[in-house]
């Protein structure tokens, strides 16, 4: 910016840029003195450059943070994000004297997809199940990839009966999935689900462990079904 011609502009607008991206504009009204305006403009150019770099770094930090909290394969929140929010969500439901339910979801016989069709086919199955879970989310619900072929959903405000209905809907939608891998139709996909509800099952860890115990019951009873934790399951959870 050259002010040697002796004229002082009424305003200066400097782009805040970094890495070929524009993040905003820096607006400035120079003083009347042309020498002072020239000095100020030099500093403003340096300031705009530094602000642009700072904003780019903030965006990168946010992107890295999001990547650390999101499962790359399914696009769902990952276990790390679950650990960050689980306690607060359960405690919040307890303060409001409202139920919160947990679904533990496992893809039945998942190893068969990897063994018979390859790991790419297994990844397709996980992505499709993840898509079903995203589509089943209510406004306050959260879905996570818990690990491997296991998923977890938190359903604030839903009691055991409502959570079971949601679980059955998810099970039906997953059973309707049809996947073709490299021209070969895969076998049908099924899931087993365990359902637990707080405050009946108290702490966050106990809620998840109870849902997991209900999931084990569903798998032991033949898979492709949803089981709500009963008193016997509750007593089995330490």
Image: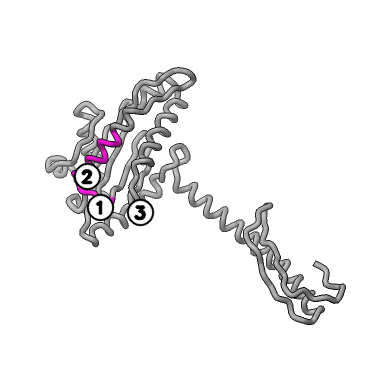
On the image, the x and y values in percent for residue 124 come to 44, 29
**Precedes in sequence: disc 1 or disc 3:** 3
Label 2 sits on a secondary structure element that is: helix
Image vertical order of residue 169 relative to residue 202, above or below: above
Identify the secondary structure beneath mark 3: helix
Whole-angstrom CA distance, mark 2 to mark 1, is: 9 Å
Looking at the figure, which quarter contains the N terminus? Answer: bottom right
Image position of 157 (left or right of 41): left
Number of callouts: 3
- Circle 3 residue: 85
Check disc 1 and report the residue beneath it.
157
Q: Decide whether the magenta segment is chiefly helix, strand or loop.
A: helix
For residue 40, what is the image quadrant?
A: bottom right
Q: Give the residue drawn at x 49%, y 20%.
A: 182
Category of crowding for the residue at label 2, using alpha-carbon neighbours closer than 10 angstroms: few (below 14), some (14–19), many (at least 20): few
What is the spatial separation of the Cα atoms under label 1 and label 3, in whole angstroms?
Answer: 16 Å
- The residue at 26%/41% (across/down) is 166
Q: Does the residue at mark 2 contact the one at mark 3 (Cβ under 8 Å)? A: no
**Direction front: furthest residue:** 10
Discs 2, 1 touching: Cβ within 8 Å: no
Residue 162 on image: x %, y %: 22, 45
Q: Give 21 or 59, whichever is nearer the viewer.
A: 21
Question: What label does residue 162 carry, if any?
Answer: 2
How are the colours assigned in the image?
Answer: one colour
Looking at the image, is mark 2 or mark 1 earlier in the sequence? 1
Classify 22 as above or below 217: below
- Residue 55 x %, y %: 60, 60
């Amino acid at each position: 910016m050259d002010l040697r011609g002796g004229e002082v502009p009424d305003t200066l607008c400097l782009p805040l840029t970094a890495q070929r991206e524009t993040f905003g504009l820096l607006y400035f009204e120079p003083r009347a003195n042309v020498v002072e305006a020239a000095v100020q403009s030099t500093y403003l150019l340096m300031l705009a450059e530094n602000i642009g770099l700072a904003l780019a770094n903030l965006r990168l930090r946010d992107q890295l943070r999001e990547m650390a909290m999101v499962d790359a394969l399914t696009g769902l929140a990952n276990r790390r994000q679950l650990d960050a929010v689980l306690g607060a969500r359960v405690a919040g439901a307890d303060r409001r004297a409202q139920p919160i339910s947990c679904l533990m979801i496992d893809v039945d016989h998942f190893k068969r997809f990897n063994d018979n069709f390859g790991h790419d086919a297994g990844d397709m199955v996980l992505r499709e199940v993840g898509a079903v879970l995203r589509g089943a989310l209510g406004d306050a619900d959260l879905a996570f990839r818990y690990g491997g072929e296991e998923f977890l959903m938190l359903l604030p405000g839903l009691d055991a009966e409502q959570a079971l209905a949601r679980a059955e809907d998810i099970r039906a939608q997953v059973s309707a999935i049809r996947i073709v891998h490299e021209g070969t139709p895969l076998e049908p996909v099924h899931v087993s689900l365990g359902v637990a509800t707080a405050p009946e099952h108290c702490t966050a860890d106990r809620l998840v462990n109870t849902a997991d115990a209900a999931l084990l019951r569903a798998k032991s009873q033949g898979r492709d079904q949803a089981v709500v934790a009963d008193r016997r399951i509750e007593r089995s959870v330490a």
